[in-house]
Amino acid sequence: LAKTTQPISMDSYEGQEVNITCSHNNIATNDYITWYQQFPSQGPRFIIQGYKTKVTNEVASLFIPADRKSSTLSLPRVSLSDTAVYYCLVDYSSASKIIFGSGTRLSIRP
Amino acid sequence: NAGVTQTPKFQVLKTGQSMTLQCAQDMNHNSMYWYRQDPGMGLRLIYYSASEGTTDKGEVPNGYNVSRLNKREFSLRLESAAPSQTSVYFCASRKTGNTYEQYFGPGTRLTVT
């Protein structure tokens, strides 16, 4: 099974745009990419999903290049409350197996 | 809507004891999942149920059994707990179709001594 790879941690400041990239080299044709946010002592919370190109919702954008071997979560104008762990997840629809990445710990400073 | 609920919130077991973690969802979702999360780590899939009446192994199924009791409920059983099963356990559910959003419960913190 392929795994996803993300940076272990990132730091940024309030008001900045933050981009977190995830590598998923063995993604298959029917697999979707989703991103989750997790605060301490809570379950993960869904942020966004995508298949290709660009997806945007009210909280984030997701960029997926044509080869789909990576994806980038973009958080515009972060605030202190965006300090959390962010997980990239590839839903392997063909094998019905789900692999969470190890997560990126994002710290936002004033 | 309560979403996904899990009981208990906390549990301490001695090695060799058994217990069942309960999970229920009120969103009429077809798929349900059990994950474990060790300190400082990501989530690992233990078992999942794509629909009522079906279950399948995930990445780390050894030492666990599951039951999809009905569409709402999906339980996880530890028959003989081991210290290596000390973890936080999350249950999740998902509609099938083109949405891959999983809804997670608040978790059960299990310690095995």
Image (tube, grey):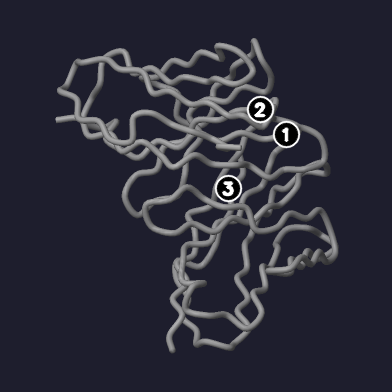
Are marks 1 and 2 in one subunit?
A: yes
Residue B48 image label: none
- Residue A103 relative to residue A2: left or right: left
Q: Secondary structure at mark 2?
A: strand
State the residue at coordinates (62%, 83%).
A77
Number of labels in the image equals 3
In the rendering, at what x and y percent does residue B89 appear? Answer: 40, 36
State the residue at coordinates (58%, 48%).
A3
Residue B55 occupies quadrant: top right
Residue B31 image label: 2
Three-letter amino acid code at the position of disc 3: Lys
Badge 3, how many Cα within 10 Å: few under 14, some, many 20+? some
Residue B84 occupies quadrant: top left
- Residue B33 relative to residue A83: left or right: right
Most foreground residue, A24 or B63: B63
| Subunit under mark 3 | A
Q: Disc 1 or disc 3, which is closer to the eye?
A: 1
Distance from label 1 to label 3 (Cα)?
24 Å
Label 3 sits on residue? A3
| Subunit under mark 2 | B
In the rendering, at what x and y percent does residue B90 appear? Answer: 45, 37
State the residue at coordinates (57%, 25%).
B48
Badge 1, how many Cα within 10 Å: few under 14, some, many 20+? some
Q: Disc 2 or disc 3, which is closer to the eye?
A: 2
Label 1 sits on residue? B95
In the rendering, at what x and y percent does residue A83 appear? Answer: 46, 71
Say which quadrant the C terminus of chain A sits in.
bottom left
